[in-house]
Image (spheres, rainbow, N blue to C red):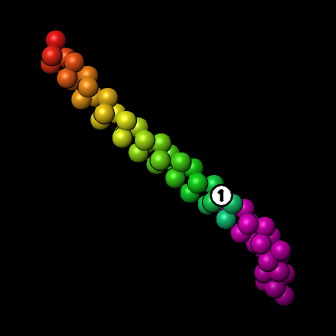
Amino acid sequence: MKVWGFAQKPKTINPIAAEVTEIKRMLTSFIQKLIAECLLLLNLESPKKEPEKLVYTQST
């Protein structure tokens, strides 16, 4: 009977915990996508800037 009592209590807590974990997963995936996009933008911009610096250093 105690096992059923313990089993019933997490059932009321689990939906809230499941929603919290889903929100955490959504936020973490969203933040990871933002970081990945920022890194891609930096990687796309940095090779364009670095060869120009190399060209300027080589020309001078």
Question: What residue lies at 41% left-to-right and 45% top-to-bottom?
Answer: 40
Question: What residue lies at 73% left-to-right and 66% top-to-bottom?
Answer: 19
Image location (x, y in percent) of residue 48: 30, 33
Magenta part of the protein: which range? 1-21
Query: Left or right: where does residue 46 sit relative to residue 33?
Result: left
Q: Main secondary structure of the magenta part?
A: helix
For the residue pair 59 and 10, the one nearer the viewer reads as 59
The reply to whether residue 6 is visible in this rendering is no
Quadrant into which the C terminus falls: top left
Question: What residue lies at 71% left-to-right and 69% top-to-bottom?
Answer: 18
For the residue pair 5 and 24, the one nearer the viewer reads as 24
For the residue pair 17 and 49, the one nearer the viewer reads as 49
Res. 54 image quadrant: top left
Q: Is residue 25 magenta?
A: no
Image location (x, y in percent) of residue 33: 52, 53
Q: How many marks?
A: 1
